[in-house]
Amino acid sequence: MTNDQPTSPIAVHPRLTDEDRARSEYYAVLGRLFTAPPDAALLRLLGEAPLADEALPLHQAWNRLVQASRAMDADAAAQEYTDLFIGVGKAECNLHASFWVRDTLQRPLVAVRADLAELGLGRADGSAVYEDHLGALCETMRLLVAGGPDGRPPEALDVQRRFFERHVAPWAIACVCAISECVVANYYARVAEFA
């Protein structure tokens, strides 16, 4: 018996390795925390997360973030986020690559927009966050590592690496170090340490 019905292609994506799932979740947490202050539900979720074996510095930083989330109040987190990243007149710490990377021929925002377009990605409609914002870049890395809920497959490791090296590596460490050293940072000092 034959079926003359046209068939549609089936997209098959390999399962994420444990390492890729962990990297994806790492970027998801950072993307969310750098894009907006944590609400009570997110603080509770982070605070209920299991502590890691403290053998590695990343695990130690995670444990401090979990413990800080247990103690942090959502209103205080929102005020700290505003004081640190929005401010009155000028933010204490700027979360945009354009602030940190200045001595290049191509502006970071222009470069990231071009690379996002090449990947078929872009800023979500209605989003006030520019594409060179640390939170947006972490969310992009999450999509590149894990793919998207719309069936978008993960990108190859060399694509992930190239995006990271072009748009995150040149400035993110300087940014999170500035956050951790800022006298206004309390909860976000733990976020920066984890980053």
Image (cartoon, grey):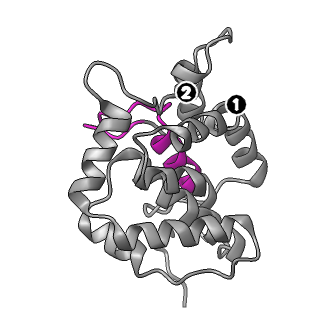
**In the image, what residue occupies the spot 42% across and 55% down?**
187
Q: Is residue 124 above or below residue 44?
A: above
102 and 120: which is toward the camera: 102
Query: Residue 19 lies in magenta, yes or no?
Result: no
Task: Say left or right for 156 vs 167.
Answer: right
**Residue placed under numbered mark 1 in the picture:** 170
Q: Is residue 132 above or below residue 109?
A: below
Q: Amino acid at mark 1?
A: Pro
Q: Quadrant of residue 22?
A: bottom right
**Residue placed under numbered mark 2 in the picture:** 97
Residue 80 in the image: state x and y as whole percent: 32, 46
23 and 33: which is toward the camera: 33
Residue 112 in the image: state x and y as whole percent: 57, 28
Q: Earlier in the sequence, mark 1 or mark 2?
A: 2
Q: Secondary structure at mark 2?
A: helix
Q: Secondary structure at mark 1?
A: loop
Give the crowd class for mark 2: few <14, some 14-19, many >=20 residues within 10 Å. many
* Gap in angstroms between the C-alphas marked 1 and 2: 9 Å
Q: Amino acid at mark 2?
A: Ala
- Write the start and end of the magenta stretch as one range: 123-143
